[in-house]
Image (tube, grey):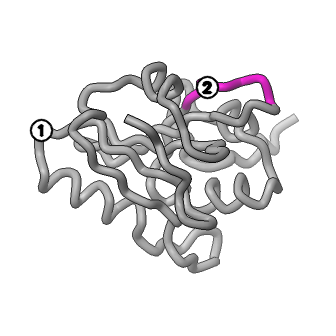
């Protein structure tokens, strides 16, 4: 399979689990829903869902190796865990930051902000990945502890 470049300002959302079509539809709805975040109501994450049975069961390491048309810097992945808890895996493909293949999971409410900041180059992939909780899921930036 060859990954095509997503529509402008969108990120490919690859389905790698084909065990439950209803769970997939629910996961896509959660990932693209409009959320209020820090008092700002967004537009929903700009994702371009991709379904292909050739992707079934592929790991992030496998997806990094797929040939691509054009320069794709980021992939979003809906895997078996996504079908259960709606967290989405993000995979860094940006060859300029020397961390190709690095991943972290993100809760749906944070997805739009991450994708927008990465698309505009306001922030780097590692900023979010380094701020993920110990379980590897980014749930937002934490306020610093006010105690000295």
| Disc sitting over residue 19 in the figure | 1
Magenta span includes 77: no
One can see residue 80 in this view: no
Contact? badges 1 and 2 (CB < 8 Å) = no
- Main secondary structure type of the part rendered in magenta: loop
| Disc sitting over residue 44 in the figure | none
Q: Residue at x 62, y 56 (%)?
A: 115
Rendering coords of residue 44 (x, y %): 49, 71
Of the image marks 1 and 2, the number of the one nearer the N terminus: 1
Quadrant of res 102: top right
Up/down of 5 relative to 124, above or below:
below
Where does label 2 land, which residue? 102
- What segment carries the magenta color? 97-103
Between residue 40 and residue 25, name the one nearer to us: 25
Up/down of 107 relative to 148, above or below:
below
Magenta span includes 102: yes
Q: Residue at x 53, y 57 (%)?
A: 6
* Quarter the C terminus occupies: top right
* Quarter the N terminus occupies: top left
One can see residue 132 in this view: yes
Between residue 70 and residue 28, name the one nearer to us: 70
């Amino acid at each position: 399979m060859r990954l095509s470049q997503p529509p402008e300002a969108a990120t490919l959302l690859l389905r790698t689990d084909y065990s439950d079509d209803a769970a997939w539809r629910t996961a896509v709805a959660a990932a693209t829903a409009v959320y209020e975040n820090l008092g700002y109501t967004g537009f929903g994450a700009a994702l371009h869902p991709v379904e292909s049975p050739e992707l079934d069961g592929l790991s992030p390491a496998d997806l990094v190796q797929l040939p691509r048309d054009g320069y794709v810097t980021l992939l979003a992945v809906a895997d078996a865990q996504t079908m259960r808890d709606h967290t989405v895996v993000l995979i860094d493909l940006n060859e300029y930051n020397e961390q190709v293949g690095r991943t972290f999971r993100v809760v749906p409410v944070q997805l739009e902000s991450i994708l927008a900041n990465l698309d505009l180059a306001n922030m780097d992939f590692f900023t979010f990945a380094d701020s993920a909780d110990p379980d590897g899921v980014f749930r937002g930036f934490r306020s610093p502890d006010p105690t000295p």
